[in-house]
């Protein structure tokens, strides 16, 4: 007998593989940190700040949505702020019954406004995760090279990530996509593979299907951030399925950055049922004002997932997570009996 799943998806233990630390901030925390620093803000209540610090409606493009990160980015004012934001990110995961999560951030993007030291900021993040250890959320950390910060920033991020490979689970390439084809990064990611780090790359969000195809072939990416345009080309779709490349799909984000025109047209269900390793994630819960429960509700109520689809997407996420197998086995045993054995 398959387990009976609750109608209230909040009650379901969940997995989020695609969540940016810089996109996790609570509005009251942004306000509190700015007040303590005597800094400027365009609004001093959550209601007044929201239009400036969040993306609550579809924007014209991914690039416009990325521009809304400025206020969150400036909140990483000192190491204590970094620790607090990380701790609160894990508290929010726990409150939404997310039991395994990978948090990703771009050291250059996060550290630049306040001139923080990359190692110091990472120590503060590790401290924030450690401060949340009583919450029973398994957390893996992913370092991001931001495409728009240029080649030398990307190379520095790779060197840094390799040096910290013991405390990271993976590496990502993110930011504006158009004009940054995967071929630019084929040499860059070699040390990441050699260091044994998992590789996920933001491709197929605003770029054509050739980009995720090249990310699979030239970069040997094992996961694609969004990967929506995989659905635009039957050949690319077949390759993603054959290689078992996980697609980190994020319905609200994909609508608000115009990766899909309407959530009902999201290809997640079709791809999943065709055998693609679709997963459902938040991308930026603070920026978009959402939780993972909300994304699974969208999948169920607007994209047409049934419980078997939800089960399979969660099983895919557990399988594709870069966390060590023994950690995943423990999390499975404690929380994911409802997922059952792997599809
Ligand atoms: Zn993302």
Image (cartoon, rainbow, N blue to C red):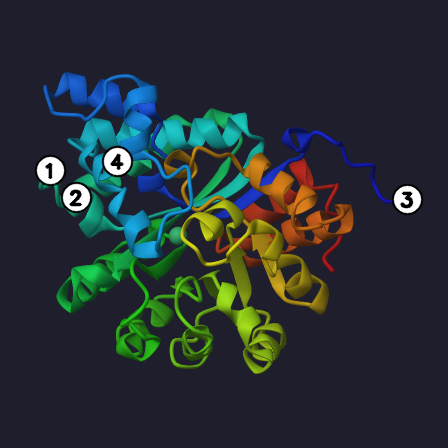
Mark 1 vs mark 3: give the one in front: 1
Q: Quadrant of the C terminus?
A: bottom right
Q: Residue at x 21, y 40 (%)?
A: 70
Please tell me in which quadrant of the rendered image residue 221 appears.
Answer: bottom left
Label 3 residue SS: loop
Q: Earlier in the sequence, mark 2 or mark 3?
A: 3
10 Å crowding of disc 3: few (<14), some (14-19), many (20+)? few
Q: Earlier in the sequence, mark 2 or mark 4?
A: 4
User: Which mark lies nearer to you, 2 or 4?
Assistant: 4
Residue 283, given in percent of the width and then of the height, sits at 43, 46
Residue at figure coordinates x 55%, y 78% from the top left: 233
Q: CA distance from mark 4 to mark 1?
A: 12 Å
Quadrant of the rendering where the N terminus is positioned:
top right
Which label is found at residue 1?
3
Alpha carbon distance from label 1 to label 3: 55 Å
The disc at residue 72 is 4
């Amino acid at each position: 007998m398959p387990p009976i799943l609750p109608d209230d998806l909040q009650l379901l233990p969940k997995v989020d593989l695609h969540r940016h630390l810089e996109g996790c901030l609570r509005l009251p925390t942004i306000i509190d940190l700015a007040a303590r620093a005597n800094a400027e803000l365009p609004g001093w209540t959550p209601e007044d700040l929201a239009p400036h610090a969040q993306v609550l409606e579809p924007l014209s493009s991914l690039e416009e949505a990325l521009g809304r990160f400025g206020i969150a980015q400036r909140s990483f004012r000192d190491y204590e702020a970094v620790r607090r934001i990380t701790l609160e990110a894990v508290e929010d995961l726990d409150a939404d019954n997310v039991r395994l999560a990978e948090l990703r951030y771009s050291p250059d993007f996060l550290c630049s406004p306040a001139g923080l030291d990359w190692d110091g900021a990472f120590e503060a993040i590790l401290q924030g995760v450690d401060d949340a250890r009583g919450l029973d959320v398994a957390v893996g950390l992913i370092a991001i090279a931001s495409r728009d910060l240029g080649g030398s920033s990307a190379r520095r991020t790779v060197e840094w990530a390799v040096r910290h490979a013991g405390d990271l689970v993976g590496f990502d390439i993110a930011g504006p996509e158009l004009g940054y084809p995967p071929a630019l990064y084929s040499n860059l990611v070699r040390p990441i593979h050699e260091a044994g780090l998992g590789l996920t790359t933001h491709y197929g969000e605003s770029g054509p299907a050739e980009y995720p195809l090249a990310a699979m072939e030239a970069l040997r990416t094992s996961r694609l951030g969004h990967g929506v345009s995989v659905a635009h080309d039957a050949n690319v779709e077949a390759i993603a399925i054959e290689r078992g490349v996980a697609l980190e799909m994020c319905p609200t984000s994909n609508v608000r950055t115009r990766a899909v025109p309407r959530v009902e047209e999201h290809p997640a269900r079709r791809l999943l049922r065709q055998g693609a390793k679709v997963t459902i994630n938040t991308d930026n819960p603070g920026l978009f004002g959402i939780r993972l429960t909300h994304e699974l509700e969208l999948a169920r109520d607007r994209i047409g997932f049934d419980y078997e689809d939800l089960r399979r997407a969660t099983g895919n996420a557990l399988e594709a997570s870069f966390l060590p197998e023994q950690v995943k086995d423990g999390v499975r045993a404690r929380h994911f009996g409802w997922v059952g054995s792997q599809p």
